[in-house]
């Protein structure tokens, strides 16, 4: 292996130690022959220059080895997952074909690697996920639960490796994404220790001052905290031993992120948070005896310390949707302090700490939140969602984090829903058709409306009517993402049908009055009327919220107004280029998407792109393409909300006319500064000054200068020269 050039000295030591540990833990999973082949392929990929560092300088091999170790420690390795992690980058750099991997190691490993490569493709152009890519990424995750687990482990490794990374923005972006995407997914899969570390590191990279403050306070109080834990545990330990129980008891400090959340929620300082730690009792008991022994511990502890009944959390009788089983109680301990005690068996603790990688099917509970059903629900929501990524995560977070209620059908089937779910949520959970026709329910023998909020133990019989259909206000009644998506779908279908009817009405009215319709003029009228989409406009017509005769009159007014106006003066400011095929000798200034022809485009006024800028196209509602700079202030919103309307664009080899841009010049208020600036501009070849607006305040001069330039290079040259003018403090291009 080309270690000398591939690793730094520190990385080399780290790699050797990690590799030895992985060898020991994976010896039973990977035979010597397979291990030799994998080692050989990775070495050859490095030697051939295919297995390089990533674009942020991260050592990819080191990251993969640590990902495998995280999986080994936090999840529990299985052969397919381990080999997929080790061979993933060899396949990604195309040193080894997927066909070869499938032939050598089987279809299952190839399937995982394909999922990882698919997810990686969404990160190819940026560090964090944007717009439609977000949806595609989660859909990739939903295809195989092992892909989710590997990506979560890999993200934890990356978070650990970027602690001293020089690119602060890259580190902050990765941290934010870990917080809103990977930590919730880790939580959903029961990978609590990974989830906690992701959240802690995210806080560290995005709010270092708060993170360091909490760490400092915890270190300050560690001795007193340890002493208190010993005082609490000692008598409890003695009583449990007298009862003949086999157990382990320990104190565990809560995560920094969890403490920070409590500080925000309670508006308190670290020292004022009473439950900085929890006592955990882990029982060694056979599965048939687990629950009985847990309740025995509960009885012993509550006999010794006064319990708070409002803080009892029983996840023994009915586990959480991700398989978490435990009994949580809060008791009044020594020194008049409330202390949380968690009681569970060794098996329960393993699931709680290491997740559900191999144990994710639960008997006796039918729920959209079981992992099989949850993954299907993820697919269902994502495939039909139109909201941006943050809205999607809000919906998922609600389903992932909220406490649950347990309700029954008249036949006795048990279902889980988030706390706050209504009769309408339950109806949509059972079946979309049932939800769409729901008019209420019989709950525990009594009639209730669709707004009734479900309580644990309720028995529910849904009432329906063929005359019922989804209403807009239903979105305010339901709380589950599945119900919201189905209601929105139904409303869109109804609105679309109504809009088609409205369109027919308008077309007939135009025909009756013998008016030939100009579509572009009609589009301008619709926009002028304040409608965001054509569908909204036609729907308003059909529902008689606007008068059809008024619309026709307004159309005729606009038509007469435009026909009376003189031809538009075409300047560089609103220059429109047409792609034509008649004059083949003249090259197009812009190449849009896949060399599309006959398309009208305009240079956007919000960012004034000029030749040489990195650009993209945005399809307007009229079908015209607006050209924007990549760093346009409106670009993030356009990509997030209307990603489907964004098209690729680039400048061709042929330079076009001059382009308008605005410069902001700031300097000392001196009578000669304007003369010097205008003098430089006038001397520049092919630079024309169109306008200058000057303002001075408290000894400072500020000017906005509109100039026409050939390209970005000419603009940068002009900016450099203006910065040399005596008294000028700053020159920048306006967005």
Image (cartoon, grey):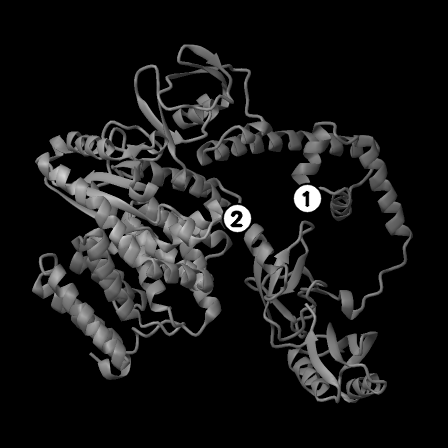
In percent of the image, x 16 and y 64: which residue is there?
22
Q: Nearer the viewer, mark 1 or mark 2?
A: 2
Q: Quadrant of residue 53?
A: bottom left
Q: Is residue 228 above or below residue 480?
A: below
Q: Nearer the viewer, residue 579 or 169?
A: 169
**According to the image, label 1 marks what residue?**
532
Q: Position of residue 295 (x, y in %)?
A: 20, 30
Q: Position of residue 579 (x, y in %)?
A: 67, 64
Q: Position of residue 260 (x, y in %)?
A: 43, 52
The residue furthest front is 335
Q: Is residue 706 visible?
A: yes
**Mark carried by residue 195:** none
Q: Quadrant of the C terminus?
A: bottom right
* Neighbour tally class for label 2: few under 14, some 14-19, many 20 plus, Cα within 10 Å: some
User: Relative to 10, is 614 on the left or the right?
Assistant: right
Q: Position of residue 562 (x, y in %)?
A: 86, 51
**According to the image, label 2 marks what residue?**
388
Q: Is residue 106 above or below residue 425?
A: below
């Amino acid at each position: 292996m080309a270690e000398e050039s591939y690793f730094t000295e520190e990385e080399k030591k780290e790699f050797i130690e990690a590799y030895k540990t992985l060898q020991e833990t994976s010896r039973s999973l990977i035979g010597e022959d397979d291990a030799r082949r994998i080692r050989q392929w990775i070495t050859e990929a490095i030697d051939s220059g295919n297995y390089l560092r990533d674009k942020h300088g991260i050592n990819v091999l080191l990251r993969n080895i640590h990902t495998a170790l995280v999986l080994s420690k936090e999840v529990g390795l299985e052969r397919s997952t381990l080999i997929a992690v080790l061979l993933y980058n060899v396949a990604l750099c195309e040193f080894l074909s997927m066909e070869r991997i499938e032939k050598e190691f089987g279809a299952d490993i190839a399937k995982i690697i394909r999922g990882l490569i698919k997810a990686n493709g969404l990160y190819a152009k940026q560090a964090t996920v944007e717009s439609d890519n977000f949806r595609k990424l989660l859909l990739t995750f939903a295809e195989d639960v092992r892909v989710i687990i590997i990506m979560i482990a890999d993200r934890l490794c990356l978070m650990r490796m970027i602690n001293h990374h020089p690119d602060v923005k890259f580190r902050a972006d990765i941290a934010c994404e870990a917080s809103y995407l990977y930590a919730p997914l880790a939580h959903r899969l029961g990978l609590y220790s990974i989830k906690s570390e992701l959240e802690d590191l995210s806080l560290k990279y995005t709010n270092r001052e708060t993170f360091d403050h909490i760490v400092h306070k915890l270190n300050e109080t560690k001795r007193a905290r340890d002493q208190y834990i010993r005082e609490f545990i000692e008598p409890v330990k003695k009583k449990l031993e007298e009862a003949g129980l086999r157990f382990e008891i320990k104190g565990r400090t809560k995560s920094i992120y969890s403490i920070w959340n409590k500080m925000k929620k309670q508006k308190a300082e670290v020292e004022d948070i009473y439950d900085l730690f929890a006592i955990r009792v882990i029982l060694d008991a056979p599965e048939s005896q687990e629950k009985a022994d847990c309740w025995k511990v509960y009885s012993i502890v509550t006999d010794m310390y006064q319990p708070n009944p409002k803080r009892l959390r029983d996840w023994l009788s009915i586990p959480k949707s991700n398989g978490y089983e435990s009994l949580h109680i809060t008791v009044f301990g020594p020194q008049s302090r409330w202390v949380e005690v968690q009681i569970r068996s060794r098996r329960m603790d393993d699931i709680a700490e290491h997740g559900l990688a191999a144990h994710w099917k639960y008997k006796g509970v039918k729920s959209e939140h079981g992992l099989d059903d949850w993954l299907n629900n993820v697919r269902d929501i994502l495939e039909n969602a139109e909201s941006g990524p943050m809205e999607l995560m809000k919906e998922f977070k609600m389903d992932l984090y909220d406490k649950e209620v347990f309700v029954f059908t008249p036949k006795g089937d048990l279902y889980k829903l988030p706390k706050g779910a209504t009769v309408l949520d339950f109806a949509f959970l059972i079946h979309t058709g049932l939800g769409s026709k729901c008019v209420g329910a019989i709950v525990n023998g009594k009639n209730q409306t669709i707004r009734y909020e479900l309580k644990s133990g309720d028995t529910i019989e849904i009432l329906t009517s063929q005359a019922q259909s989804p209403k807009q206000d239903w979105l305010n009644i339901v709380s589950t993402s599945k119900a919201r998506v189905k209601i929105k779908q139904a409303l869109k279908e109804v609105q679309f049908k109504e809009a088609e009817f409205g369109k027919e009405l308008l077309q007939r009215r135009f025909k009756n009055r013998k008016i030939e319709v100009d579509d572009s003029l009609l589009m301008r009228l619709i926009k002028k009327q304040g409608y965001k989409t054509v569908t909204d406009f036609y729907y308003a017509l059909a529902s008689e919220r606007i008068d059809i005769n008024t619309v026709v009159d307004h159309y005729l007014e606009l038509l007469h107004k435009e026909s009376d106006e003189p031809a538009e003066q075409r300047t560089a400011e609103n220059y429109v280029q047409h792609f034509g095929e008649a004059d083949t000798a003249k090259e197009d200034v812009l190449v849009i998407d896949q060399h599309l022809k006959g398309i009208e485009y305009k240079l956007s006024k919000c960012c004034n792109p000029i030749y040489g800028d990195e650009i993209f196209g945005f399809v307007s509602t009229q079908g015209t393409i607006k050209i924007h700079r990549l760093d346009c202030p409106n670009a993030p919103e356009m990509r997030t909300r209307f990603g489907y309307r964004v098209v690729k664009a680039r400048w061709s080899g042929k330079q076009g006319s001059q382009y308008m841009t605005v410069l902001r010049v700031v300097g000392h208020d001196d009578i000669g500064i304007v003369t010097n600036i205008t003098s430089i501009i006038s001397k520049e070849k092919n630079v024309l000054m169109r306008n200058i607006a000057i303002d001075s305040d408290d000894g400072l001069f500020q000017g906005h200068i509109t100039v026409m330039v050939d390209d970005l290079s000419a603009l940068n040259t002009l900016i450099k020269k203006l910065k040399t003018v005596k008294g000028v403090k700053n020159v920048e291009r306006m967005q």
